[in-house]
Image (cartoon, rainbow, N blue to C red):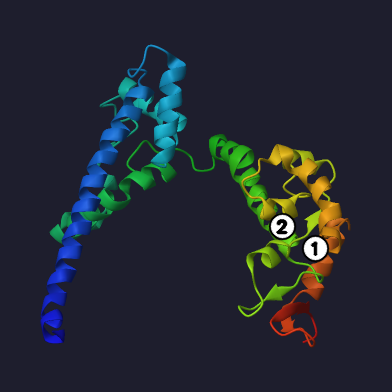
Amino acid sequence: MSGDFLIQEPQLSICILHFWTYFWVQSGCVFLGVWVIAHECGHHAFSDYQWVNDTVGLVIHFALMVPYFSWKYSHRRHHSNIGSIEHDEVFVPKPKSEIEWYLNNSPGRVITLAITLVLGWPLYLAINASGRQYDPYSKGLAWLICIYVLPLLILNGIIVFITYLHHTHTSLPHYDSSEWDWLRGALATVDRDYGVLNKVFHNITNTHVVHHLFSKMPHYHAVEATEAMKPILGEYYRFDGSPLYKAMRREAKECLYVEPDEGSKGVFWYKNKI
């Protein structure tokens, strides 16, 4: 029996590879069909109503990781300037003086074609590869960085900051499998006060305990639920109203690693003695 299995195993692997190859190819083809719908939306050909075109196009292109409005405007310029060496947007041919040396041989052309097929579209979206060249230090790039990239970096930092302070505190226990259960884990978090930002963040900052207990509850009920929950949980509810900069400095200093509780097997507490 085992010998038969060993004989069949390579065949099974080949079948699996064939299945995935078929799945990838047919999914890519279906994706293109969906992409074409968004393409028509960009031309305002999908609907007589612009808001319908833009809504459907934005949703579809978002799912396909394409910046809908940026693409719509650049694609419109392509249609307005098709065939123009100076003003077209895609696959603008280069003069002989700008042709790279590796395109003068078959391996170079094959490698270039492979890279173009695999990375051409994301490179076009990212740096306008194969399109009309722009000054990389133009006001457009600076504007993009100012209104999108830097706020996105701030968002990323805030997410990490909030999550770290929710789950890092000297009063928060951790458990191994001998003591852990879902309720104990859900209570191993702490609410913080972010002042006016509590409202901006939909109170995820000062109602995180109740969020772990009732994760399907919408944020607009979280404050009310937290107030109702406090007397029930008593000492098991944790809140730290320390100024955030002090809290971050303290937790980074005092919560370096965990050690087992001396009196309770399976329970661990943050320590900082190295």
- CB of mark 2 within 8 Å of CB of mark 1? yes
Which residue, given by chain and number where applicable, does mark 2 sit on?
Answer: 161
Marking on residue 165: none
Secondary structure under tag 2 reads helix
> In the drawing, does residue 50 fall left or right of residue 159?
left
Name the residue located 30 percent from the left edge and 34 percent from the top edge. Answer: 34
Name the residue located 12 percent from the left edge and 86 percent from the top edge. Answer: 3
Residue 233 versus residue 93 in the image, above or below? below
Indicate the amino acid at tag 2.
Phe
Q: Nearer the viewer, residue 238 or 202?
A: 238
Label 1 neighbour load within 10 Å: few <14, some 14-19, many 20+: some
Q: Position of residue 11 (x, y in %)?
A: 12, 71
Marking on residue 248: 1
Q: Is residue 10 visible?
A: yes
Name the residue located 42 percent from the left edge and 13 percent from the top edge. Answer: 49
Q: Position of residue 101 (x, y in %)?
A: 24, 56
Q: Is residue 87 visible?
A: no
Quarter of the image with the C terminus is: bottom right
